[in-house]
Amino acid sequence: MKISKFIKDLFTTGFTQIIVLLMGIILLRIMATALSKEYFGIFMIIRRVIAIGVGLITLNLGVGLARYVSYKREREKEFLNVTLLTITTLSFLTIIIFFLFRQYLSKLFFNSTDFSSFVVLSSFLLFSVGLFTIAYAFFRGRQNMYRANTMQFLYYLCPVILALILWIVFTTQYSKILIYYYLLFSLGGILLSVAFIRNNLAFFTFRKIKKHIQSIKNLFFYSTSRIPSIFFLSFTFGIPVFFASNKISLEAAAYVGIAVSVVRLMELFATPFNLLFLPKFAEIKRDHNSQEIKHKISIVMDFIFSVLPIFAVLGYGLGKYLVIIFFGGKYIDAAPSVSLVILFSAFYVAYALLRGILDGLFSFPYVNSICLLGFSITAITSFLFHENISFLALNFGLGLFFMGILSIYILIKKGNLSLRASNLLISFIIIICSLFVSFFVDRLIADAILNEYWKFGILVLYRAILLLLLFSLYWKPKSLWYREFLHRVRL
């Protein structure tokens, strides 16, 4: 059996993303146990500061580097080193600013001036995360996913081991645990990133940079022009929680937050594709192969229309069990909202898939328009209708729906694709039939079986049978994506 490099990269990247997710969950459990509620709150706040700050401190150059290294391989070292010089300069400025205003920022972040040391430590962690982001993007652009995945695995394993050791050594000494954690994790992340890219580090004179200034300008414009999409997307996911906490209650905010988190979990499915699509389509564009571009886009569109809605429909009835598995039985009241957003999750996953293609093919930041539309729809509908949790979940789902639709429209328009109405009609009929079948069978099982374990097992079993039937009767004989899969996995 001969498997193509793309399929190998897809599976290894997907596996790595799952491992990283599990390590993140383990880290949260360790910190939640090792720290007091106050210090665990500090830990969670710093996580949010890093998540928002890394996009600014790197100027979103991680996305640009992944594209331009693939698009212009002969200048990869120039792109890498100019990017590193930029984020190093910005990081040191950030460290100085955080140090000078540590009391004010401590009050802003933690509502107390007693934790100013964590403000300074978070600035060092920002530098570490930024450096890792650039190093990972470099290997992603080179399509060396083995090296990228290895680095990512080691980078996320480091904090888990650190947290476990510090918990054992400094039991109940919460401040020491966090201080040493951030110091050692920052240092370890910097050393790891440098170790992986050391052979590509070089010093460039201003004259040499000036020689390629236009390409470097293009890289910076491409990256920074996409920064608004980061904020629009964050606001889209944050608005329902904001309205729930301000208009209903903090408990309602927790339930809506769970629904939002489930969509983030669904995004895990699309992440490997997104990571690979951007450099892959940039490479195809570099070769000026318009027919291959159209063919590849057609395959992805076929997958989106025929597969994603089916999984969303079948996932609809499992919302309650997802809540129990990931968040515990005490949050069972969030199940209806979770089920509702699962139906719309197919459109967000479609956006996540297509974003890599759009970013790989086009310099224009179409993602800004897509995320702005999602933000606008969610904000307007939440402002008008926020009476209960279900309304807020629906508002969020509508934002995701329009993001997916606009992504599909832009790619069809720009890719000069023509979709067969008959194929779309068949997909629509199968989706509607699957929805009705799953709805009525779920009701029948709920009434006939009382034991929750048996009920869950049967729900999963009949969904697996339904997927097997769809595969045999529909996907296998009809779909473009399955033919492409067979072509890349030669038996």
Image: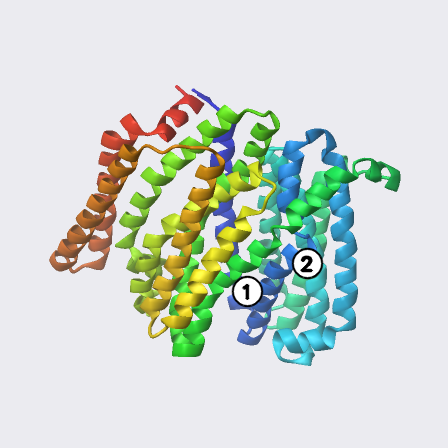
Q: Is residue 343 left or right of residue 123?
A: left
Q: Measured from the top left, where is residue 367 in percent x and y? A: 53, 49
Q: Are marks 1 and 2 in contact (CB under 8 Å)?
A: no
| Sequence-first disc among 1 and 2 | 1
Q: Is residue 385 left or right of residue 467?
A: right
Rounded to the nearest whole Å, what is the CA distance between mark 1 and mark 2?
19 Å
Q: Amino acid at mark 2?
A: Leu
Q: Quadrant of residue 309?
A: top left
Residue drawn at x 32%, y 53% as measured from the top left: 343
Query: Of discs 1 and 2, which sits in the foreground?
Result: 2
Residue 470 in sight here? yes
Q: Quadrant of residue 55?
A: bottom right
Residue drawn at x 45%, y 66% as measured from the top left: 379
User: Quarter holding the N terminus?
Assistant: top left
Which residue in the structure is indicated by mark 2? Answer: 126
Q: What kind of element bears circle 2?
A: helix
Residue drawn at x 49%, y 25% as measured from the top left: 292
Q: Which mark is residue 31?
A: 1
Residue 485 vertical position relative to residue 414 in the rendered view, above or below: above
Q: Is residue 450 left or right of residue 417?
A: left
Q: Measured from the top left, where is residue 4 in percent x and y? A: 49, 24
Q: Measured from the top left, where is residue 18 in percent x and y? A: 47, 46
Which is more toward the observer, 258 or 229?
Answer: 229
Residue 269 in sight here? no
